[in-house]
Image (cartoon, rainbow, N blue to C red):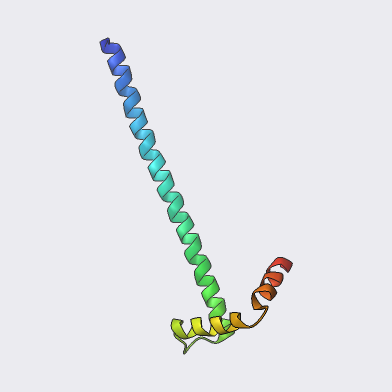
Amino acid sequence: MTEREEKQLEKICEKMEFMKSKQKEILSREKKRIKKERVRHLIKCGELAEKYFDLNDINPVEFEKILQALFDVPDSREYIERIKRSL
């Protein structure tokens, strides 16, 4: 291999490393964005649950028991699905 070819190969390898680094950076940013979106969504849903269930003096374990009781009601899941589809 000539010196010129070696330099070209070296440049190509450097570019590949740079591109791999950029790819990791972009994927990392995308993961962070998705995570932030999910956290915002959870916070909004939690705020709504707190508002409508008056959760000021209820801890998460108690709230989970309330939700379990609500979903034990026959056809409650189907009813919620129908509401979601109609939105």
- Could you tell me residue 72's position as x and y percent? 59, 82
Total numbered labels: 0
56 left or right of 6 in image: right
- Could you tell me residue 1's position as x and y percent? 27, 11
Q: Nearer the viewer, residue 76 or 5?
A: 76
Position of 12 relative to 55 (above/below) = above
Q: In the displayed image of the protein, which residue is found farthest to the left?
A: 3
Q: Residue at x 32, y 23 (%)?
A: 11
Q: Residue at x 47, y 55 (%)?
A: 33
Position of 7 relative to 72 (above/below) = above
Q: Residue at x 71, y 70 (%)?
A: 82
Give the image quarter of residue 69: bottom right
Position of 43 relative to 69 (above/below) = above
64 left or right of 87 in image: left
- Could you tell me residue 44's position as x and y percent? 54, 71
- Could you tell me residue 56's position as x and y percent? 48, 87
Give the image quarter of residue 6: top left
Q: In the displayed image of the protein, which residue is found farthest to the top?
A: 2
Q: In the displayed image of the protein, which residue is found farthest to the bottom?
A: 57
Which quarter of the figure is the C terminus placed in? bottom right
Position of 37 relative to 23 (above/below) = below
Q: Nearer the viewer, residue 67 or 75?
A: 75
